[in-house]
Amino acid sequence: MVPLYTCCPFPSSKALQISPSFLLLSSRNPKFLPFTISRILRAISISTSAAKHEEPIRTSYAGVQLEETVDETKEGKLRLDSWISSRIQGISRARVQSSIKSGLVKVNGRVVDKVSHSLRAGDKVNCVISDLQPLKAEPEDIPLDIVFEDDHVLVVNKPSHMVVHPAPGNANGTLVNGILHHCSLPTVASSEKEVLFDTEDMSDDEQDIFHGASAGPASVRPGIVHRLDKGTSGLLVVAKDEHSHAHLSEQFKQHTIQRVYISLTCGVPSASAGCVDIPIGRDSNNRIRMVAVPGLSHHGRARHAASRYKVIEVLAGGGSALVQWRLETGRTHQIRAHAKYMGIPLLGDEVYGGTKNMALSLLRPRTPPYYNDELSRLVSRLERPYLHALVLGFEHPHSGEKMRFSCPPPPDFGEILNHLRKIGIEKPISKE
């Protein structure tokens, strides 16, 4: 075990506390609501899994066999990887694709290694799921926006489009790769144990999945306490030693971590402020998406989820809004799923309905004709869900000092916001 704190050089720096001029959080002295985070998963191997309501969750898919004939009632084009994924409950398509590329899938007795191979009704498919391949995180010289650093913690402003940890399809260019280089740490070898991500008390876009790999001498503990989704920008804390990691993780579990998100939405909430208290579970029709379903808490793996929101600005005549979010619970994609449930999916969130077409349908009727061309160019540049982790506050794991950091959203967020303001801006009427 190579502890991070023994070999990570750092500059002398001060905590940056930036108050974005464009945003009124709630008052001059905003009050924070508590948040939760997932229990610690001590492995880095990435193989997500979701189960149907009636079946238990597998902990390993290695060696699972499928021998089945494509239903005669099926019509249209069926991709091989998609069809197999639909027949083995909870398995990730990436895992299926790996098995196909490894030559472990036959169609009508012939090996097929093309994941997009088209199936027809009556085809006989034989598949064996491959062993989970260990992942390695190599140190990479990746520029990091370090907001604060001392002997024990590191606070990073993660850019959008950066993945936090290595995973199938994202072995390089991750935040972990950059941290390993920044801290002069060796390659991290992952465990071959599969990790299930649909776990209790998962925070929005976050889970501890990189703290500790296998117990061998090659493994290290970079101390990723939580994570942000690939498309989400903003603040994230990293622990540099075992004590710090344990202390910060406990703060997440005890709901004492302070976090505030901001987003741009398609449309405006019917109420300018409120709390969405709707359970969230895995979408049975799309395993990468969560869904908010009233009345299903503790049923079918849906769990209690509550998000407080406040409209900061009404934009483009009601075609969009700048919304602040504070989480009372923490579930996978909680903000994104609750926003969709409210009928205001995040701008640019293709997975949850915030598509370019939806944005145009809401914005164009509210936009002056002379601005239509600019609007079309603006919408065409939407490349991610416009969600930003604006504020992060926690108790320092060693000194006990209350620390609070704020970081304005990145240029792409600001550009979209400014264009929407040009179309129109209103301050909602506060009921407080």
Image (cartoon, grey):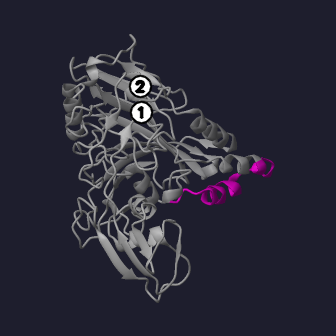
Residue 29 drawn in magenta: no
Instruction: Indicate the amino acid at tag 2.
Output: His
Q: Quadrant of the C terminus?
A: top left
Location of mark 1 (residue): 177
Who is closer to the viewer here, 201 or 168?
168
**Residue 90 picture location, percent across and down:** 32, 65
Q: Is residue 322 visible?
A: yes
Is there a contact, CB below 8 Å, between mark 2 and mark 1?
Answer: yes
Secondary structure at numbered mark 1:
helix
Q: Quadrant of the N terminus?
A: top left
Who is closer to the viewer here, 324 or 336?
336
Q: Bounds of the magenta span?
A: 353-373
Q: Label 2, label 1: how many angstroms apart (C-alpha)? A: 7 Å
On the picture, is 335 further left or further right than 35? right
Classify 367 as above or below 237. Answer: below
Location of mark 2 (residue): 181
Question: What residue is rendered at 26% in x and 68% in y?
Answer: 300
Classify 198 as above or below 427. Answer: below
Q: Main secondary structure of the magenta part?
A: helix
Q: Which mark is residue 420?
A: none
Secondary structure at numbered mark 2:
helix
**Residue 163 picture location, percent across and down:** 44, 41
